[in-house]
Image (tube, rainbow, N blue to C red):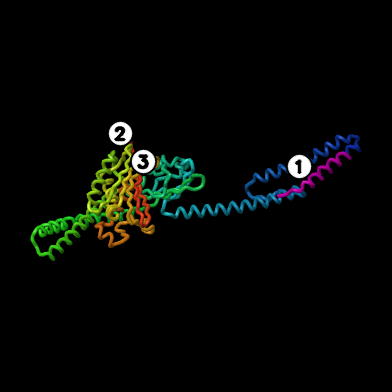
Amino acid sequence: MHVPQHALLIKLVLCGLIGLATGALLGHALAGFSVGLLVWAAYQIRRFNQLSEWLQREDGAEPPEARGAWGELFDELARMQKRGRAREQYLRGIISRFQQSSAALTDAIVIVDNQHNLEWWNRAADRLLGLRATSDRGKPLMNLLRDPRFVRYYRKGHYQEPLELPSPVNSDIRLQYQISTFGDQDRLLVARDITRLVRLEQTRQDFVANASHELRTPLTVIRGYLETFLDQELPRPLMRGLNQMQQQARRMESLVTDLLLLSRLEASQHISDEHPILIHALIRQIHEDGEALATERGHRFVLDIDPEYDLLGQENELQSAFSNLVFNAVRYTPDNGTITLRWWADTQGGHFSVTDDGIGIEPMHIPRLTERFYRIDESRSSASGGTGLGLAIVKHVLVRHDGHLSIESVPGEGSTFTCHFPPDMVVPVRRAE
């Protein structure tokens, strides 16, 4: 917008000259000049007041009629106002469409500002989270979603993995929370109803648990008779077949045991309570079991244990997870290899790692290693006697302890499996004792 200043100056000079000439004719030149300037000023003030009144109106009225510089100013402002209204209407349309589309979503969507206060949410959030548009806007999120597990998840600030919790409105509804950050540390919270998926998963778990439990009895009977037959003096071909049957029966028993354990771990995402664990004694016991398993393999074990810190959790679950990692290292490390067990704590939490100098793992297999029954090499896994469930058990034990598993491996050089635990699960040794 440009208003020609020379036009205003010309009018100012003309008013002054006219006043000066009129005053000179009347014998008061200076007074006439002043009156001329006052007339010009009064005209400008009147136009300014007209402009101010028009700008304050919101009914879209046409600008006041004027000529010259003021006319150009009014016209330019009118055009800017029309463009602004069109832009505002366009943006309102976008916001309206966004609100309509988000209202149609079945997932709850909540926007939280950088002060952790509720800024906006859709209708599904009213139904799933119990938020009220009339009273909850601007309130802290923690005052409305008070579950300690959600509060801990929110405050950690690490949202790579979603969180599953019952709905605060209806405990029969299972929600999956996912948080993303955007802008100036604002957060977008999405809560998805996964009740149906949870029920399907529960049905699968119940089936696996029941089937595994029912298999125990016939397997026990079969193994009992096999042991009885093997104690007899029987022909060599028959003994060979009975030995193979006994090996497969033991393998099936291990599979059933792992399936039952995995089903129990999957029954809940968190441990019911936490107990101080003498982690040093636990690792040494697992070390002895690993040495017994590797008696004929010639493996060398190295222990590197931080004596200052212990761990909180469920000892039997952690023993199962750590044992699986150590026994896998024994099975898949060539004879006379080195296996290192390490426990340490730092500002990131507690860590237990098992390192071997075995055959290693190709990078494409690493993301899928914790899947049930996933095998890199079927023949190698069968020969080792593994069930294909060990790392799945490790994963679920760590999830229940708010931890996670990391895997580093170089083909031909070895692998390192590390269990990471949060800082609040690590305690000084003297406290545990």
> Which of the two discs, 2 and 3, labels the residue nearer the N terminus?
3
Locate the C terminus and report the quarter of the image it occupies.
top left
Disc with the residue nearer the chain's start (1 vs 2) = 1
Please state the horizontal and vertical placement of residue 368, each as a whole percent of the image. 35, 57
Return the mark for residue 345: 3
Main secondary structure type of the part rendered in magenta: helix
Give, as a three-letter code, the residue at label 2. Arg
Which residue in the protein does label 2 denote?
Answer: 430
Q: CA distance from mark 1 to mark 3?
A: 78 Å
Q: Nearer the viewer, mark 1 or mark 2?
A: 2
Report whether 137 appears left or right of 410. right
Seen at 26% across and 43% down, the residue is 284
Q: Amino acid at mark 3?
A: Ala
Q: Measuring 64% from the left and 46% from the top, which residue is drawn there?
A: 57
Q: Residues within 10 Å of mark 3 (few under 14, many from 20)?
A: many
Helix, strand or loop at disc 2?
Answer: helix
User: How much space separates mark 1 and mark 2, taking CA atoms?
Assistant: 86 Å
Compared across the picture, whether 80 is left or right of 301 comes to right
Residue bearing the label numbered 1 = 44
| Magenta stretch: includes residue 156 | no
From this view, report whether residue 208 is shown above or below residue 280. below
> CB of mark 2 within 8 Å of CB of mark 3?
no
Residues rendered magenta in the picture: 1-21
Q: How far from the left and from the top, in percent, is residue 348?
A: 39, 42
Q: Measure the C-alpha gap from mark 2 to mark 3.
A: 15 Å
Residue 25 versus residue 227 in the image, above or below? above
